[in-house]
Amino acid sequence: MKLRTFLMIVAVVALLYGLGLLLLTTFMATTYGFGTSASEILLGRFFGVAMLTLGLITWLAKDLTGASIKPIILGTLIGDAVGAVVALMGTLSGVMSAVGWSAFGIYLVFTLGFAYFQFMAPSK
């Protein structure tokens, strides 16, 4: 898979989650087993803003090459790796419902993808 294609996939997933968290906050919260208090909804919306930002950054970076794309790859690699750990902890502890495994899986796949492009993909 080419980096451009991978960035587009990450962007679409992040944008969809971001919009879902901003527009369907209560649905997303209950799907993942979270509460729906005003503070939990606000936190969900803040997370939606972060996902929207990630989606826009990765979409806008899809045509970058060489040294200009490296900071985005490394930053998203670290962020996704931490996200995978947090999602795993949240799911194993029961804070998130079984749907939390999907969050862990998405973070894990993105971590592995960004690790590939950071450390193993041929330089161009």
Image: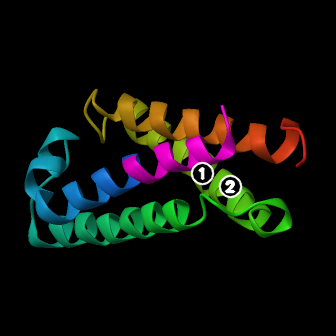
Say which amino acid is labelled 1: Val
Q: Residue at x 20, y 73 (%)?
A: 42
Q: Is residue 86 visible?
A: no
In this view, 107 is above or below 19: above
| Residue at mark 2 to residue at mark 1: CA–CA distance | 6 Å
Q: Look at the numbered disc 2 and give the secondary structure of its residue.
A: helix
Residue 48, image quadrant? bottom left
> Residues at badges 2 and 1 in contact (C-beta under 8 Å)?
yes
How has the structure been colored for display?
rainbow
Front label number (2 vs 1): 2
> At 9% across and 49% down in the image, what residue appears?
27
- Of residue 53 and residue 122, the one placed in the foreground of this image is 122
User: Could you tell me if residue 38 is visible in this image?
Assistant: yes
Lateral position of residue 104 relative to residue 17, left or right = right
Give the class, few, some or many, for how many residues have Cα within 10 Å of label 2's Cα (few <14, many ≥20).
some
Instruction: Determine which of the numbered discs, if any, sits on residue 82 in the image.
Output: 1
Q: Which mark is residue 78?
A: 2
Q: Determine whether the residue tagged by mark 1 lies in a helix, strand or loop.
A: helix
Q: Main secondary structure of the magenta part?
A: helix
- Does the segment drawn in magenta span residue 3? yes
What amino acid is found at the position of numbered circle 2 in the picture?
A: Ile
Q: Which of the image's four quarters has the N terminus?
A: top right
Q: Residue at x 63, y 57 (%)?
A: 76
Q: What range of the chain is rendered magenta? A: 1-12
Horizontal relation, residue 96 to residue 68: left or right:
left
Relative to 94, 22 lies left or right: left
